[in-house]
Image (tube, helix red, strand yellow):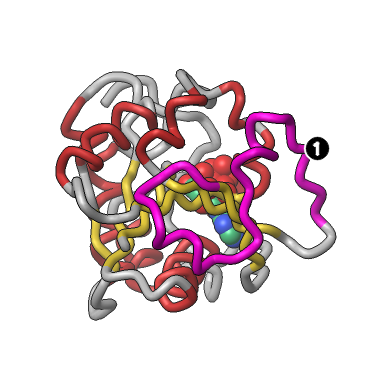
Amino acid sequence: MIGIFGGTFDPVHYGHLRSALEVKEIFGLDEVRLIPSSQPPHRNLPHAPAKLRVQMLKLAIENQPGLIIDTREIDRVGTSYMVITLESLRQEFPDQPLLLFIGSDAFNQLTCWYQWQRLLDFVHIIVLTRPGFTVRQLDDFFAARQIANKQDLSEQLAGKLYFQPITQLDISATAIRNMIANERNPGFLLPDAVIAYIKQHQLYQTQTAQTAY
Ligand code: ATP
């Protein structure tokens, strides 16, 4: 089984990294593919250019076998639609269950995603839940696909919905960017090598998003 973890990674932090490592172990995955988006459809432009976000990811996952950077969204240029990404992954891995990991906040917005009903044609969706965080009431579409036992995920290649609690780290890229813009130290929220890279390239000095790539 292969895991898929999309995001802007602007910058990557321990909330992403711990989650990726944890789900790799929990689900016994061969690999988790971290997929940085070039231009997410539902949010502002990333602050750091795609190439630099990939560099930060590289520094972050050095010496972590099984965590892989997949640049297909950046290579594609234009809006990063998850359904297109998943379709291409399914073509590349025709025989393996694919698990798409998303945070519960992202899951609550899922029905706004482009062609969201088709996502489950290509992958199982695993929602990473926070204790005490309410996931919205499941509609019939998702309720019909929800499973309670993660062993069932290996029985088919795609199409199921599963909720997985993970270790909670209240870290966000937004908070990190704000700290840097306010000359505060983001230490211990993301790897030192990434912090050094941010300093070297003077990223996130202001709170405005980039306007061009
Ligand atoms: P921003 O603050 O810029 O919105 P972010 O920190 O939420 O960024 P993203 O790159 O947008 O990071 O997140 C990608 C994925 O990682 C999403 O599915 C999101 O739910 C999940 N994620 C982000 N932060 C955490 C965290 N602290 N713990 C678990 N999952 C996280």
**Screen quadrant of the C terminus:** top left
Q: Secondary structure at mark 1?
A: loop
Q: Which residue lies at the image location 46% right of the left edge and 59% below the top edge? A: 153
**Screen quadrant of the N terminus:** bottom left
Tell me the amino acid under the disc marked 1.
Answer: Gln
Q: Is residue 49 visible?
A: yes
Q: Is residue 176 visible?
A: no
**Does the magenta run of residues contain 142?**
yes
Seen from the viewer's position, the closer of residues 127 and 197 is 127
**Does the magenta run of residues contain 47?**
no
| Magenta-drawn stretch, dominant element (helix, strand or loop) | loop
Residues in magenta, as a range: 133-160
Q: Which residue lies at the image location 54% right of the left edge and 75% below the top edge? A: 188
| Crowd around label 1: few <14 · some 14–19 · many ≥20 (10 Å) | few
Q: Is residue 63 left or right of residue 208?
A: left
State whether residue 86 is above or below residue 167.
Answer: above
Residue at the extreme front: 155
Q: Is residue 42 left or right of residue 68?
A: right
Q: Position of residue 193 (x, y in %)?
A: 33, 71
Q: Position of residue 29 (x, y in %)?
A: 34, 70
Seen from the viewer's position, the closer of residues 47 and 35 is 35
Q: Which residue lies at the image location 47% right of the left edge and 19% below the top edge? A: 114
Q: Circle 1 sits on which residue? A: 137
